[in-house]
Image (cartoon, rainbow, N blue to C red):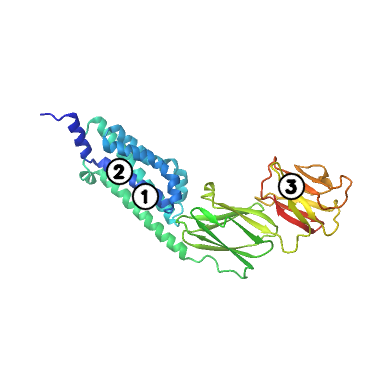
């Protein structure tokens, strides 16, 4: 007596083929890969977890009804994520001293090398009507040996990464400092965020910045000054200390190279030395302009000698225009900057309630360093 269609369906669903087993293992390996590469961070897993939905859907369909097309779709759905991001993964694999990130990428590649062959073979065998091996017998075939070989290579790579990390973390780089810093700033890198994201250091002061990486992935503390990029690697679970010395007040952006697109950035505010502010300035910003209003002038300053200077935040170079222009010159707007004297165009000295207006409609950005100078004396320093 021949079996009915429902009986055949129940038999197919109840019998686990080797290809279906490999696809299931590949999917759960992919889940583990995303958890590990994100340092077991819930925020990172939620960010990448949406990519698991196609694999989960097709794996459920394959379990419910082992259709040849479901084999192929499941293999692609499990493997596509690490194929699409392969250029980034190659960069991560080049740095085995970041154990979580490196291990996560290796596990992700295992999912690819398991899922794609299993999906294609399951599809071809199903279309040809070839009987598929059961889950136990498959391990003794060439495909089974291939799957075991992939697993053993991955285990070896992960162990090598752990050894490299322990060596890097235990190796002292450099012989210390020949002088002591005058100030120290402590920063924590955790959950792909710098904390604090904004801090202040004094201009022309040797300052130690101590950064602790509490994530399970490699971060960097990177900034640019005068066209030169400075970067410090932050190994997972370690603390890095370096000294900085800034000779000009202003704002300096810093970021993590691998995770800048995730918002892992911050700002160093370099403040002027105590007592250098000899005039007072009030902010009267509007939606269309940054407005600096002079609130206190204890001594006279000729407009021809008083200079307005604005720098780009990224590299501290002087903006041109207006560049380094006297307030007398800026009575006529230049490059979106204008000086408006309280008593009119004939005024020759800096006075209370004078206004400097910087337009927001141009390419200027908040945080750009501003300096007002009389000759070589700094009257005021601040930021847009």
Q: Are marks 3 and 2 in contact (CB under 8 Å)?
A: no
Q: Are marks 2 and 1 in contact (CB under 8 Å)?
A: no
Point out residue 251 in the picture as x, y percentages from the top left corner: 66, 54
Q: Who comes first in sequence, dot 3 or dot 2?
A: 2
How many numbered discs sit on the rendered protein? 3
Q: Secondary structure at mark 2?
A: helix
**Residue identified by numbered label 1:** 32
Q: Residue furthest left?
A: 1
Of callouts 1 and 3, the N-terminal one: 1
Camera-side residue of 91 and 340: 340
Q: Which residue shows up at 51% across the image and 55% down it? A: 219
| Picture coordinates of residue 163, whole percent (x, y) | 40, 61
Location of mark 2 (residue): 24
Question: Which residue position is annotated with label 3?
Answer: 291
Mark 3, residues whose alpha carbon is within 10 Å: few (<14), some, or many (≥20)?
A: many
Residue 104, x across and y down, in percent: 40, 51
The residue that appears at 46% across and 61% down in the rendered structure is 237
Residue 43 as seen in the image, left or right of residue 142: right
Q: Is residue 322 above or below residue 179?
A: above
- Residue 35 horizontal side relative to residue 177, left or right: left
């Amino acid at each position: 007596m021949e079996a009915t269609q429902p009986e055949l369906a129940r038999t197919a669903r109840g019998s686990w083929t080797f290809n279906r087993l490999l696809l299931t293992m590949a999917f759960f390996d992919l889940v583990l890969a995303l958890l590990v590469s994100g340092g077991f961070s819930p925020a990172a897993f939620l960010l990448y977890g949406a990519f698991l939905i196609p694999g989960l859907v097709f794996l459920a369909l394959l379990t419910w009804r082992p259709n040849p097309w479901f084999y192929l779709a499941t293999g692609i759905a499990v493997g596509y994520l690490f194929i699409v991001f392969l250029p980034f993964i190659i960069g991560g694999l080049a740095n085995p001293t970041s154990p979580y990130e490196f291990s996560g990428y290796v596990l992700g590649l295992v999912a690819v090398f398991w899922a794609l062959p299993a999906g294609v073979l399951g599809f071809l065998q199903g279309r040809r009507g070839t009987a598929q091996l059961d889950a136990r017998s498959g391990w003794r075939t060439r495909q089974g040996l291939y799957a075991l070989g992939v697993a053993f290579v991955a285990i070896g790579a992960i162990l090598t990464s752990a050894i490299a990390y322990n060596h890097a973390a235990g190796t002292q780089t450099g012989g210390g400092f020949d002088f002591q810093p005058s100030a120290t700033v402590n920063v924590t890198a955790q959950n792909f965020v710098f904390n604090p994201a904004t801090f202040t250091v004094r201009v022309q002061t040797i300052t130690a910045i101590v950064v602790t990486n509490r994530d399970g992935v490699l971060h960097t503390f990177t900034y640019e000054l005068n066209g030169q990029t400075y970067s410090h690697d932050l190994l997972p679970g370690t603390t890095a200390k370096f000294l900085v010395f800034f000779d000009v007040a202003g704002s300096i952006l810093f970021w993590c190279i691998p995770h800048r697109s995730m918002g892992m950035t911050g700002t160093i505010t370099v403040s002027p030395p105590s007592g250098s502010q000899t005039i007072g300035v009030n902010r009267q910003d509007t939606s269309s302009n940054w407005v600096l209003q002079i609130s206190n002038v204890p001594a006279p300053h000729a407009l021809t000698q008083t200079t307005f200077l604005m720098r780009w935040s990224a590299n501290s170079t002087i903006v041109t225009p207006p560049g380094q222009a006297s307030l007398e010159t800026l009575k006529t707007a230049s490059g979106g900057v204008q000086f408006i004297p309280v008593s009119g165009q004939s005024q020759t000295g800096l006075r209370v309630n004078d206004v400097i207006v910087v337009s927001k409609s141009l390419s200027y950005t908040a945080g750009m360093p501003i300096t007002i100078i009389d000759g070589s004396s700094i009257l005021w320093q601040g930021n847009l």
